[in-house]
Image (cartoon, rainbow, N blue to C red):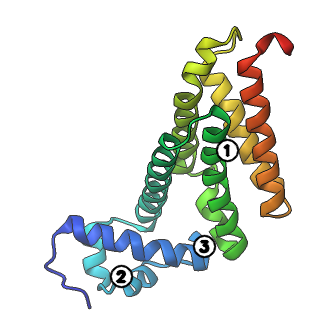
């Protein structure tokens, strides 16, 4: 068993990491607190010192995964020069990871259920990131579209691509087409 005298924040991090793998493998419904405790190397009573229930662990797992992905996207976007390249990187990184997780672990679909508050929050976080990417190009264009609406359209489109794609290549092709059209539209809004 893990050292049960370790600081609570370290224990919580360890639990979230272990629980992620358990939720991927079994989904939310089939996962028990006992499964999570065992994966984290803790007793169930020690697990309850860090989290009140399975739902709070599940929410922490989703929030940690989203925070990691958003940080990865922000770093990668900063390295890209064109709007199109930034959008492709952001959208592919956001949806490909989710697509591949569900492909490899069918029960991982629970981690993307929009009925779960942190999942809805994750889409808001991604929309905010897209708004940051398009803010200046949109302001420079003559399009009269609020940035939050424009960002929501992009976010919802890539979610639809993820839900409907037959494979990674089709998903990437759709993301690239959306990024190309978006970049072209913001460069020359009078053409549309």
Q: Position of residue 157 (x, y in %)?
A: 75, 40
1 or 3: mark nearer the eye: 1
Which mark sits nearer the N-terminus, 1 or 3? 3
Marks 2 and 1, how far apart at CA: 36 Å
Taking the image as shown, residue 124 lies to the left or right of residue 189, namely left
Q: Residue furthest bottom?
A: 1
Mark sitting on residue 27: 3
Vertical position of residue 159 compared to residue 5: above or below = above
Mark sitting on residue 88: 1
Taking the image as shown, residue 125 lies to the left or right of residue 13, namely right
Q: Residue at x 64, y 55 (%)?
A: 113
Provide the secondary structure element on which disc 3 rests: helix
Q: Residue at x 62, y 34 (%)?
A: 82
Vertical position of residue 165 compared to residue 78: above or below = below
Comparing 52 with 50, the one in front is 50
Which mark sits nearer the N-terminus, 2 or 3? 3
Marks 1 and 3, how far apart at CA: 30 Å
Vertical position of residue 135 compared to residue 67: above or below = above
Residue position marked by numbered label 2 in the rendering: 40
Which mark sits nearer the N-terminus, 2 or 1? 2
Taking the image as shown, residue 170 lies to the left or right of residue 79, namely right
Q: Position of residue 62 (x, y in %)?
A: 49, 58
Q: Position of residue 134 (x, y in %)?
A: 60, 26
Q: Residues within 10 Å of mark 2 (few under 14, many from 20)?
A: many
Q: Quadrant of the N terminus?
A: bottom left
Q: Residues within 10 Å of mark 3 (few under 14, many from 20)?
A: many
């Amino acid at each position: 068993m893990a050292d049960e005298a370790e600081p609570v924040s370290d224990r919580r991090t360890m639990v979230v990491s272990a629980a992620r793998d358990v939720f991927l493998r079994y989904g939310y419904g089939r996962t028990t607190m006992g499964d999570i405790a065992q994966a984290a190397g803790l007793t169930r009573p020690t697990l309850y010192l860090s989290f009140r229930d399975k739902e709070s662990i599940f929410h922490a797992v989703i929030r940690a995964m989203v925070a990691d992905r958003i940080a990865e996207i922000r770093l990668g976007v900063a390295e890209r020069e064109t709007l199109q390249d930034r959008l492709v990187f952001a959208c592919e990184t956001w949806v490909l990871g989710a697509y591949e997780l569900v492909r490899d672990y069918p029960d991982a679909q629970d981690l993307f259920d929009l009925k779960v508050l942190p999942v809805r929050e994750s889409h808001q976080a991604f929309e905010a990131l897209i708004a940051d990417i398009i803010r200046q190009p949109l302001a420079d264009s003559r399009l009269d579209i609020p940035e939050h609406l424009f960002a929501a359209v992009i976010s919802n489109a890539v979610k639809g691509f993820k839900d409907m794609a037959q494979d990674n290549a089709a998903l990437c092709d759709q993301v690239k087409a959306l990024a190309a059209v978006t970049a072209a539209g913001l460069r020359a809004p009078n053409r549309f």
